[in-house]
Amino acid sequence: MKSTFMQSKETVSRKWYVIDAKDIPLGRIASKAATLLRGKHKVTYTPHVDGGDYVIIVNASEVALTGNKLEDKMYYDHSRYVGGLRKRTAKEMRKDYPIEMVERAIRGMLPHNRLGRQMYKKLFIYAGSEHPHLAQKPQVIEMGGNK
């Protein structure tokens, strides 16, 4: 009788992937990146092991948002002081903080525990089209159509 395969952290092999976010909806990029970071695209996926790959996202400043999200979607931060709530629209975030906007979308799709924090460290986001990870020979992921 065969037993179920359980991957261990010693047997994990990792690859590098590049996702071009230009004119691709934010949710599609985030879900694809979260799947790659978790390792769910591999046949060796094991829920309690960080078996995911490295993900590089370029052109984060040109990510698409469908519908009225540019004006309606709000991002909230609070300093934990009285009156310390800061609200920003998605339009402001894309213009001033594009990396943080994509980071938040992806981080929300990862587990909210130690394992998720470990997976998050393998994510690299850049506002422009250049990245310093050419030595790792990353594979380009085609995301398909826009909007």
Image (cartoon, rainbow, N blue to C red):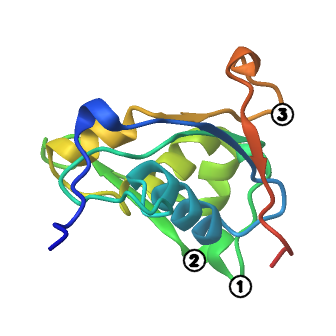
Q: Where is residue 30, by image quadrant? A: bottom right
Q: Which residue is drawn at 36% across and 45% down?
A: 51
Q: Which one is earlier in the sequence, the residue at label 2 or at label 3? A: 2
- Is residue 87 visible to us here? no
* Element marked by disc 2: helix
Badge 2 amino acid:
Asp
Q: Which one is earlier in the sequence, the residue at label 2 or at label 1? A: 1
- Residue at numbered disc 2: 72
Marks 2/3: CA–CA distance? 27 Å
* Element marked by disc 3: loop
Marks 2/1: CA–CA distance? 9 Å
Badge 1 amino acid:
Gly
The crowd level at tag 3 (other Cα within 10 Å; few <14, some 14-19, many 20+) is some
* Screen quadrant of the C terminus: bottom right
Return the mark for residue 129. Answer: 3
Q: Where is residue 79, by image quadrant? A: top left
Q: Where is residue 119, by image quadrant? A: top left
Q: Is residue 47 above or below residue 17?
A: below
Select label 3 or label 1 by which is in front: 3
* Element marked by disc 1: loop
The crowd level at tag 1 (other Cα within 10 Å; few <14, some 14-19, many 20+) is few
Residues 94 and 111: in front is 111
- Residue at numbered disc 1: 67
Residues 79 and 27: in front is 27
Image position, residue 56 (x, y; %): 64, 37
* Outermost residue, front side: 1
